[in-house]
Amino acid sequence: MAEHAPARPVDVALRVERLSAGYAGSLVIAEVSATVGHGEVVVVIGPNGAGKSTLLKALAGIIPVQAGHVLLDDRDVTHSPTDRLARQGIGYVPQTEDVFEDLTVRENLAMGGYLLHKAERSTRIDELIATYPLLSDLTSRRAYKLSGGERKLVAIARALMNRPRVLLLDEPSAGLAPQLSKKVLTEVVGQLAHTGVAVLLVEQKAIAALEVGDWSYVLSAGRCVLSCPARELLVREDIGEVFLGNTGDDKQYEVGRPRP
């Protein structure tokens, strides 16, 4: 077990309290607790089937929460539908089907800003193009013609159109070549926190994700088995076993922050 790190203050944007969720009455995650601070990247890793994507879908309102609570800036949003969560400040980028393939990049961004007035929507598109200059050469290109990395950038930018306070990212590097996946994680995800957005990142490329993360949670068999600063998880000699959910301790434990 890693040594205890000093607790650090966190300006909490998203708080998850003993959350349980699944499909057709069958639990996939059980009593998962987590916090994400404003301007923080929190990484969720674990083996396939651990419940990582299910956690994000429950937080995004795509599947129902069966028990527990979700708080956004201390407001209970547990059973809010997806559209209301978007209005309340939660953005979500799924692993697949993350863009409208037959629409241009500009049209995709406009669709992402459906909550904004027309003039504000146009201004927001310009802001995102200024933030991510690569978009400027893609605005008239249809999404199905994009490379994997370009597509993911458009998906993230689309989710940012409504200026979410919390962004849920499911496997943003999935299907990308190693160099490109690291670029997406460092140059796109890593920069989001500097804007004050709270990022909850599910990622299979654990090392690359932890390098940009502030805090980490390890899920195994639908439960959180470890919570600690990302840098502490990076230097653990048994990180391979940790990634597979084997922490060497049958009990959930947490390092450096009081239990959410």
Image: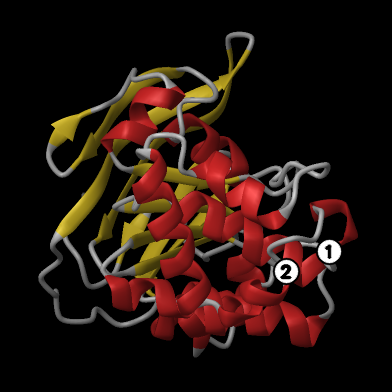
Residue 225: in sight, yes or no? no
Which residue is labeled 1 in the image? 146
N-terminal label among 2 and 1:
2
Q: Amino acid at mark 1?
A: Leu
- SS assignment at label 1: loop
Q: Are marks 2 and 1 in contact (CB under 8 Å)?
A: yes
Q: Residue at x 64, y 47 (%)?
A: 108
Which residue is labeled 2 in the image? 138
Q: Residues within 10 Å of mark 1 (few under 14, many from 20)?
A: some
Image position of 223 with respect to 209: above or below: above
Q: Nearer the viewer, residue 217 or 185?
A: 185
- SS assignment at label 2: loop
Q: Residue at x 72, y 77 (%)?
A: 181
Q: Amino acid at mark 2?
A: Leu
Q: Where's residue 35, x and y in %?
A: 27, 53
Image position of 198 with respect to 64: above or below: below
**Quarter residue 105 falls in:** bottom right
Compared across the picture, whether 198 is left or right of 160 comes to left
Compared across the picture, whether 231 is left or right of 47 comes to left
Instruction: Name the residue at the top extreme.
Output: 25
Residue 42: in sight, yes or no? yes
